[in-house]
Amino acid sequence: IVLTQSPGTLSLSPGERATLSCRASQSISAGYLAWHQQRPGQAPRLLIYGASIRATGIPDRFSGSGSGTDFTLTISRLEPEDFAVYYCQYYRSSPYSFGQGTKLEIK
Amino acid sequence: VHLVESGGGLVQPGGSLRLSCAASGYTFTSHEMNWVRQSPGKGLEWVSYISDSGSTMYYADSVKGRFTISRDNAKNLLYLQMNSLRAEDTAVYYCARRFDRWGQGTLVTVSS
């Protein structure tokens, strides 16, 4: 399974809405689609699993959706700490592939 | 949940290194573990998986035959034995509990 994320870079301002896309090379089970956030100089952090379930402690401005081959991570109102790189991942079976990442930068 | 990697460093091409990941704050024996790496300025690359019992392991094609994952459930430790290292193995290596908790990573540099 190859995961392709778009756009590569997204330039937005705090308070705006962000929509990040992840497309799979073939239909996948939404139950095994995750989103991770990686801030500069930090380890990745799980945001969303099962395509739409927020991980523990993740604010409700983060939401995930999608099915089949198309999945979306939405951040409803960007906070300064949200500017980071976001990766989607399929973790049903080996190899546990990641998308190439979307960099969310301050406009 | 706390995961702490160690064992990274500078190694020559063709050399070996063993990474460790110390787990605490949860029942180690109940969870699968993974190693994920990130080359400088690049994205995340899954490297290897081990089941909770240690009986099942998977590897990325890029490391198969050179890397070995293992765990010591009595000591709450995860390992990655890396042999025949190449320049392209240079990366920060993260251990991850399934993929819901991550360590801070350890840097491996393969260079002469």
Image: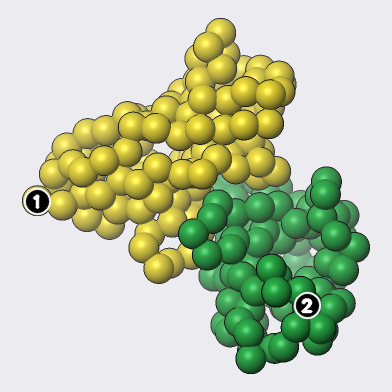
Q: Which chain is yellow?
A: B
How is colour applied across the structure in the image? by chain
Quadrant holding the N terminus of chain A: bottom right
Q: Position of residue B105 (x, y in %)?
A: 46, 44
> Disc number at residue B112?
1
The residue sitting at 66% across, 17% down in the picture is B29
Judging by the rendered image, the residue that carries numbered circle 2 is: A78
Quadrant holding the C terminus of chain A: bottom right
Q: Is residue B72 above or below residue A105?
A: above
The residue sitting at 49% across, 59% down in the picture is A41
Q: Residues within 10 Å of mark 2 (few under 14, many from 20)?
A: many
Q: Residues within 10 Å of mark 1 (few under 14, many from 20)?
A: few
User: Chain for mark 2?
Assistant: A
Q: Nearer the viewer, mark 1 or mark 2?
A: 2
Have a look at marks 1 and 2 and say if they share a chain: no
Determine if residue A90 is in view: no
**Residue type marked 2:** Leu
Q: Is residue B8 above or below residue A73?
A: above
**Number of numbered labels in the structure image:** 2
Q: Secondary structure at mark 1?
A: loop
**Residue type marked 1:** Ser
Determine if residue B98 is in view: yes
Of residues B112 and A83, the one drawn nearer to the viewer in this rendering = A83
Q: Colour of chain A?
A: green
The residue sitting at 66% across, 41% down in the picture is B101
User: Chain for mark 1?
Assistant: B
Residue A67 found in image quarter: bottom right
Q: Position of residue A96 (x, y in %)?
A: 59, 51
Of residues B86 and B56, the one drawn nearer to the viewer in this rendering = B86
Q: Farthest top residue?
A: B74
Q: Secondary structure at mark 2?
A: loop
